[in-house]
Image (spheres, helix red, strand yellow):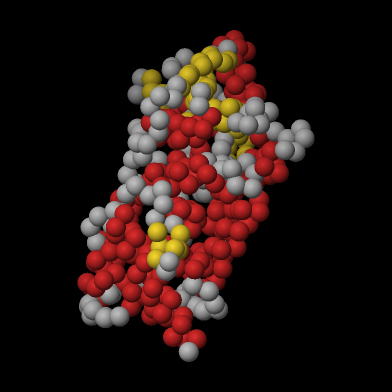
Amino acid sequence: MKEINYNIEEIKKQDEEIEKQDEEITEQKDYSFIANTNVTQYKADLAFKTLIDGFDQLLYVIPKYQRKYIWSKEQVENLAISLIRGLPIPPIYVYRSGKNQLEILDGQQRILSLFLYYKGKYIKNSTNTQVELQRLMSDDRLNRDEITFEKLLEDQYPLKDVTYELKYREDDTEKVINIRYDELPKEIRRTVDFTTISVIEIKVDDKNQKNRILYKVFENLNSGGTELKNQELRNGVYQSKFYDMLHEINNNNEKWRKIYGEKHKHSRDVELLLRFAALQYYFKLEDGSIKLYNYENSYPKFLNDFSDEAIHFDKATVDIYKENIENFIDKIEVGGGDRTANLLLESLYLASIYVNGEYKIGNDFCQTIENDKSYVGFISSSSSSKSKVQGRLNYVYNELSKYVNENKE
């Protein structure tokens, strides 16, 4: 294997370019959903009190891997002012889960804010108010008898009593009105109780396409403001034992955190674990060469297709992937250089599935590959094309095979 010598600045610039390109190919749009599938919307205008009581009783639930709750007390206050004044509040979009609960596809920040206003509460630790919904919405907690959303929230994030206020200026003087729900005048509180908020249920007629269509609906609903990244969309739609396993590794495996670095705010670390498993599922070693199946030059479609399959995996299958991923993580040596690029990590993962033996993959080995002219050719422009992906995977598989065999000798 021929080495090419780069100076440090060139290597750093190349790494940044590769990571940027990698993000671009995984954030492309997936337009592969079936156009003939019918999507129906059922709209219900619910009274504010009815909606919030139903939310507290877990008739409406927030998918556990959706974006963190990040609204400030002031944002809750502004939403409450809109409610009291009768200003329009955007609809809550939901879909019915297999457990006959309405899962919130869009509107989690609003409904949680309305809930906090109704209870006269806010997160006690005001310097760190991001609520990790995953910690609240685990299956074992949701299945407990007589559990309420308030109890789920209080168990993980202590709440404090707060006063919500309406501030305005009159005659150059700032005035303040207490608008806390339980302290509103009775007539105003009754009006607020019956103020309607629209809840729109999304129904898909083709069960086989349900998750792909919900993914697209979720994407469209979040096209304004801070747009969700592809893996954040998947997290909200493809909830399953398999996704639970990916998030468990991402949250709890200390070695993985050292390999990847800090948790990614847009879930690209979870996406990389998903990429590992998708490669293993679709790409096979045949006659000494890795063959690509179900890959059409699109990483988003590839990962969505696999997520559609993985949602049906039983526990035994999930455990196999978990063991393979954790075994690979154990093989990677940490330290002594910059983080290994995603494209190389996923290539090494697939290679490790087919290269048997007890071995470690060190930084020197990774850097030698990353600096090799042949490998660089496979990760340059159009790195998501089928030929480049197949070339990259086979190159890394061959190099790892030689490396392990040489060390055995």
Residue 308 seen from this side: yes
Examine the image and state in which quarter residue 194 appears: top right
Which corner quadrant holds the N terminus? bottom left
Depth check, front residue: 407 or 227: 407
Residue that lies at the very extreme toward the front in this rendered image: 287
Q: Could you tell me residue 364's position as x and y percent? A: 38, 80
Q: Could you tell me residue 50's position as x and y percent? A: 62, 18
Q: Is residue 201 above or below residue 30?
A: above
Q: Is residue 273 above or below residue 176?
A: below
Q: Is residue 158 left or right of residue 409?
A: right
Q: Could you tell me residue 172's position as x and y percent? A: 35, 24
Residue that lies at the very extreme toward the bottom in this rendered image: 409
Say which residue appears at 44% left-offset and 85% top-offset.
406
Q: Is residue 365 above or below residue 278?
A: below
Say which residue appears at 53% left-offset and 57% top-offset.
250
Residue that lies at the very extreme toward the right in this rendered image: 145
Say which residue appears at 50% left-offset and 86% top-offset.
408
Depth check, front residue: 351 or 99: 351
Depth check, front residue: 190 or 357: 357
Depth check, front residue: 164 or 370: 370
Say which residue appears at 23% left-offset and 57% top-offset.
381
Q: How many marks?
A: 0
Q: Could you tell me residue 184's position as x and y percent? A: 59, 19
Examine the image and state in which quarter residue 116 appears: top right
Q: Is residue 314 left or right of residue 282?
A: right
Residue 85 seen from this side: no
